[in-house]
Amino acid sequence: GAVVSQHPSWVICKSGTSVKIECRSLDFQATTMFWYRQFPKQSLMLMATSNEGSKATYEQGVEKDKFLINHASLTLSTLTVTSAHPEDSSFYICSARGPLNSPLHFGNGTRLTVT
Amino acid sequence: RKEVEQDPGPFNVPEGATVAFNCTYSNSASQSFFWYRQDCRKEPKLLMSVYSSGNEDGRFTAQLNRASQYISLLIRDSKLSDSATYLCAVTGIGSGNTGKLIFGQGTTLQVKP
């Protein structure tokens, strides 16, 4: 089946640094990618929706200048957490699909720890 | 009010038991409905889609009640391996439908020997 690869699987960084997370669709063209964040014992919260070649649409309360999303090709989207702080420590998961109503495929997630 | 709500549990049941989870959604315009399973520290995996007519996949049965805006998941003959968090999810909320998936908080199931 379709595979979405997310990298890195885990990362530890110091407060104030930036971290880039990559999400790749390996065997299909990802028209749309979604980025989620999940804190312990909480649900997956949608952060933003990105369509290839256009600006991402951010959910209410998500700072677009802090969480930079780039979706420059049909197989790659990146999320950059800028000037990370300990409260940004979380599990970040991407998902991707082709045309509307096609199945959604999830990456394996990135566990970010900011010290 | 949250868009998608679930009882977080945990539900602790013995092996072989039947357990049911419910999930309510607030937007009547929601179009598609799903149950996902999430194991600890892993990404969610699609368990099954939920259709108005109800659907069954082995020991799992999903139901949708549009009038009352809830979906349910029934697990029969619980196995130890069913222990996980079960997330309901809906799409089609809001204008300019992008197919974004909104998740409930998840219900934790612990199946005991």
Image (cartoon, coloured by chain):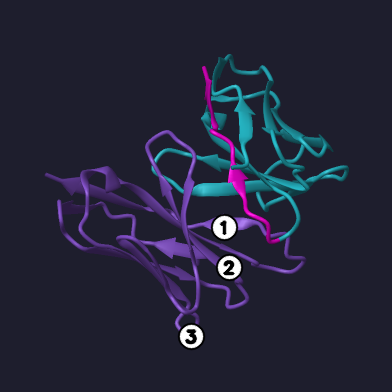
Chain colours: A cyan, B purple
Extent of the magenta region: A101-115
Q: CA distance from mark 2 to mark 3?
A: 15 Å
Mark 2 vs mark 1: tell me if same chain: yes
Say whether residue B84 is left or right of residue A18.
left
Q: Secondary structure at mark 3?
A: loop
Do we see residue A88 in this rendering?
yes
Position of residue A76 in the picture relative to residue B89 (left or right): right
Circle nearer the N terminus (2, 3): 2
According to the image, label 2 marks what residue? B32
Q: Are marks 2 and 3 on the same chain?
A: yes
Q: How crowded is the residue under tag 1: few (<14 C-alpha within 10 Å), some, or many (20+)?
A: many
Q: In screen coordinates, is A7 left or right of B110? A: right
Marker count (numbered): 3
Q: Earlier in the sequence, mark 3 or mark 1?
A: 3
Residue B8 is left or right of residue A35, and the answer is left
Q: Are marks 2 and 1 in contact (CB under 8 Å)?
A: no
- Looking at the image, residue A110 lies above or below residue B5: above
Q: Amino acid at mark 3?
A: Ala
Separation of residues labelled 3 and 1 (CA atoms): 20 Å
Q: Which residue is mark 1?
A: B102
Tell whether position A106 is magenta: yes
| Same-chain status of marks 3 and 1 | yes
Output the chain of dot 2: B
Residue on which disc 3 sits:
B67
Q: Nearer the viewer, mark 2 or mark 1?
A: 2
